[in-house]
Image (cartoon, rainbow, N blue to C red):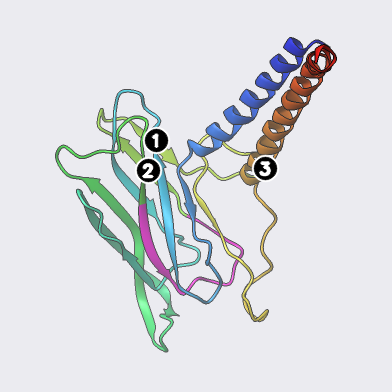
Amino acid sequence: MTFARWTAVAVIAAELGLAGAGTAAAHVGISAPDAEPGEFAVVTVRVPTESATAGTVKLEITLPQDHPLAVVRNEAVAGWDVTQKRGTLATPVDNGHGGKVSDYVSSVTFTAREGVSIRPGEFGEFKLQVGPLPHTSELAFPAIQTYSDGSVVSWIERSSDGTTPDKPAPVLKLAAAQDGTHGQPAAAPTESVTHKDSSRRLAEAALVVALGALVVSAAPKLRRVRIKR
């Protein structure tokens, strides 16, 4: 295969890898590196604006109903108003400080003030301090994203067969407790994480192929230069 063909293959492979990673990155997601059952954590909800003409002006995050969180605090965000909606628990839960609570925050809504938005090509981050985290391997935080043109995107779908839905609900993965007595073992990587890893490996392999082809192509020229000397 000629150098030109090697280069074309490498470029195509790299573009495929980057395209796959970009698609996954376009979803509303949630993360918290220190999330552990029985503990408190600060979770970050990342919101990309996918529209080319409208900005994100509202995000409603629904908190887990099957594992209600006793404490939910939102970070103040410049230019955004925040409201919390509360619900009543049939069975009180531990608040993490030796007490019990009978109601909980069922949703948190971030609304942009006049003239403020997450514009096309940008993303925003909203943080919540939550806890104590339940003894489970993951928590779903369905989200509703509203744009300045009135369009709404519902990130609420859950997979039932292992495939990634078109509008997946943000899912927080919880690590196993450090002392080994709480929670469950960390779940296997989700498809989106595995897909990112595969895409990165594909792009890296393409780069190696391209560099190798460049070296092979340049070798004869280097030998001719040495002979002339």
Q: Residue tagged by mark 3?
A: 197
Secondary structure of the residue carrying numbered label 1 = strand
* Residue 166: percent from left, percent from top: 54, 34
Secondary structure of the residue carrying numbered label 3 = helix
* Residue 224: percent from left, percent from top: 82, 12
Answer left or right for 124 relative to 136. Answer: left
Q: Could you tell me which quadrant the N terminus lies in?
A: top right
For the residues labelled 1 and 2, say whether their Cβ atoms are less than 8 Å apart.
Answer: yes
Q: Which residue is drawn at 71% across and 37% down?
A: 201
Alpha-carbon distance for marks 1 and 2? 6 Å
Asked if the magenta segment contains residue 33, the reply would be no
**Which of the numbered marks, if any, corresponds to residue 139?**
none
Determine the main secondary structure of the stretch shown in magenta: strand
Which amino acid, mark 1?
A: Val
Alpha-carbon distance for marks 1 and 3? 27 Å
Which amino acid, mark 3?
A: Asp
Task: Work out whether residue 87 can be spotted.
Answer: no
Q: Which residue is drawn at 53% across and 62% down?
A: 33
In the rendered image, which quarter is residue 206 located in? Answer: top right
Q: Residue tagged by mark 1?
A: 153
Q: Is residue 145 above or below residue 217?
A: below
Q: Could you tell me which quadrant the C terminus lies in?
A: top right
Alpha-carbon distance for marks 2 and 3? 28 Å
Secondary structure of the residue carrying numbered label 2 = strand
Q: Nearer the viewer, residue 221 or 175?
A: 221
Q: Residue tagged by mark 2?
A: 144
Disc 3 residue crowd, few under 14, some 14–19, many 20+, Cα 10 Å: some
Q: Which residue is drawn at 39% across and 87% down?
A: 99
Q: Which of 204 and 16 is in front in this view?
A: 204
Q: Which callout, 2 or 3, points at the residue further toward the start of the chain? A: 2
